[in-house]
Amino acid sequence: MDFELSDEQRLLRDTVRDFARQEVAPVAEELDRTKSFPYELVRKMGELGLMGIPFPERYGGGGADTLSYALAVEELTRVDSSVAITMAAHTSLGTMPIHLWGSDEQKDDWLPQLTSGSKLASFGLTEPEAGSDAGNTKTTAKLDGGEWVIDGSKQFITNSGTDISGCVTITAVTGPGNGRPEISNIIVPTGTPGYEPGEQYRKMGWNASDTRPLTFDGCRVPESNLLGRRGDGFKQFMQILDGGRIGVAAMGVGLAQGALDEAIAYAKERRAFGQPISTFQTIQAKIADLSAQIEAARLLVYRAAREKDAGRSFTLTAAQAKLITGRLAVRATEEAVQIHGGYGLIEEYPVCRFYRDAKILTIGEGTDEVQQMVIARQLGM
Ligand code: CAA
């Protein structure tokens, strides 16, 4: 495997690193505290080309590979997870299904506004009774006079209720199927009568990102809003989740790295027993262990991205990367808080927010237990 990044990949990574330090870091604490969606940052990310990194240039995208996308997600999360998940959910979950399975007309309609970041897309898979058991979709879509009539609900949907939310692509049962219900994907534009995003959840972390339940009550969209082939919905969304897991795994590496950065800086500055705590072996051992684990996890994430870019199967590696990095982020942020002592519990210190932002990484985009299932199945069990 080639461990070197190309010039383009390095340039993108450094651009995002500068953007995160100069534009995101100064406002991250306030956005989190006031639970404010980062509209201004999304606008700037759109201008920088960060809202459509892996999509074709003819649709306004960056035409870049998955590794470039993962590098950008990693650098954003190193500074702030809310901004990172806004970009990542929009890209690999919201826009990707339209890029992969959209008709020419659907792509022309949606991709330019999504890749520019002037509109956000979201991914409507999870339901009250369909979380880990994602195939247990209860939302229905019935054809009536050339329109889909959608009834049901979704939950935990990122980017669905902002002022710039453009559409959600949902799974819905469109027929009895053969043995198990026929599930299809349908694009529902924001503002369609009968489609209502609910109130924001009060969350433990990712406070500046937008997450809501959705209800569909006799919501009618044209038959042509079907995405891809009727009945392919579940498989399409499983494929999307595989790719999305690379992005969330990159978040885990970025968050762990951000926690390590803060812990090192604090340990050099904080004095106890007459010397900086960075000189104590117990602190050095924590830092050294974390740095080794982060580097190993980073290589696994990059490997999953390279497998996807090479057109090889990456389901196994993406699940392994997601499993390892979520746990690592939880451990790294906890250790960073520990090194900060009492200050680690004070919100002015980024590690306090990092700690709250970490836990979701062992749950979102498939729990650790789902990753274990996926890995075991890939190993033939
Ligand atoms: N790619 C393509 N096809 C796939 C696939 C994949 N990765 N995984 C399964 N399929 C296909 C299977 O081949 C099978 O097809 P056939 O009927 O032709 O055999 C079909 O889909 C059904 O597969 P399974 O029998 O394996 O399905 P299952 O019901 O046992 O579920 C599961 C498998 C892995 C547990 C799946 O339900 C799953 O991944 N659940 C977790 C869902 C999840 O990650 N949700 C996160 C939502 S998004 C999110 O969280 C975003 C956020 O935080 C911001």
Image (tube, rainbow, N blue to C red):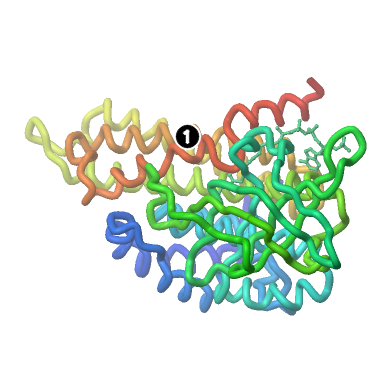
Looking at the rendered structure, the secondary structure element under dot 1 is helix
The quadrant of the picture occupied by the N terminus is: top right
Q: Nearer the viewer, residue 26 or 200?
A: 200
Residue that protrudes farthest toward the right in the picture = 178
| Residue 205: percent from left, percent from top | 39, 46
The quadrant of the picture occupied by the C terminus is: top right
How many circles with numbers are drawn on the protein?
1
Residue that protrudes farthest toward the left in the picture = 274
- Check disc 1 and give the amino acid type: Leu
Q: Looking at mark 1, is its residue's CB closer than 8 Å to ligand 1?
A: no
Judge from the rendering whether residue 45 lies leftward or rightward of residue 127; answer left or right: left
What residue is rendered at 69% in x and 38% in y? Answer: 134
Quarter where residue 333 is shown: top left
| Residue 53: percent from left, percent from top | 62, 67
Quarter where residue 370 is shown: top right
Q: Which of 261 and 231 is in front in this view?
A: 231
Quarter where residue 191 is shown: bottom right
What residue is rendered at 85% in x and 46% in y? Answer: 175
Judge from the rendering whether residue 231 lies leftward or rightward of residue 122; answer left or right: right
According to the picture, the residue beneath numbered tag 1 turns out to be 328
Judge whether residue 339 can be spotted in this image.
yes
